[in-house]
Image (cartoon, rainbow, N blue to C red):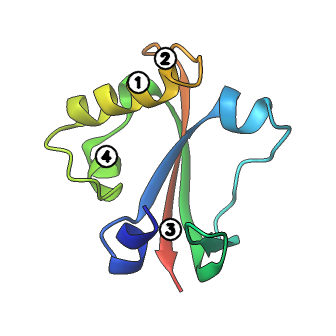
Amino acid sequence: MTDLVLSGHKTATAGLLTLDYEAEGEEIEHVGERLALVGDSGERVGEIEITRVEVVPFAEVSWEFANAEGEGYASVAEWGESHVGFWRAYGVEVTGSTPVVCLWFRLL
């Protein structure tokens, strides 16, 4: 995924409110926050700045967001299928009302 960010194709990412924030005791990122972009070996390869944050029910994730994830999805439905499978692997069942944290960012 780091390569997609560095190439400019990926300008958004998603997390589950329950899995990625509440379970970890983490605050949701805020606009203007800067985060290190880390490579596969744990080295810092860049920095991103959060430009937009939305928490929406899974069923309301927009095509604008799904497309901004830069992973080549043909539709928001395909994005949804991929993400349900990803989160299921972590033992989380996603429904239409599951809160998704949608983060947009820019590479600095």
* SS at circle 4: helix
Look at label 3 and name its amino acid. Answer: Phe
| Label 1: how many Cα within 10 Å (few below 14, some 14–19, many 20+) | some
Q: Where is residue 101 in the image (x, y as percent from the top left)?
A: 57, 41
Vertical placement of 27 versus 5: above or below? above
Q: Where is residue 79 in the image (x, y as percent from the top left)?
A: 29, 36
* Residue for point 26% across, 52% down: 67
Q: Work out how far the residue at label 2 is from the one at label 4, CA to CA, in angstroms.
A: 16 Å
Give the number of the mark in front: 2 or 3. 2
Q: Do the residues labelled 1 and 4 touch (CB within 8 Å)?
A: no
To which residue does mark 4 refer? Answer: 66
Q: Are marks 1 and 3 in contact (CB under 8 Å)?
A: no
Look at label 4 and name its amino acid. Answer: Ala
Q: Nearer the viewer, residue 61 or 26?
A: 26
Vertical placement of 96 versus 104: above or below? above
Q: Work out how far the residue at label 1 is from the one at label 3, CA to CA, in angstroms.
A: 23 Å
Q: Do the residues labelled 1 and 2 touch (CB within 8 Å)?
A: yes
* SS at circle 3: strand
To which residue does mark 2 refer? Answer: 94
To which residue does mark 3 refer? Answer: 105
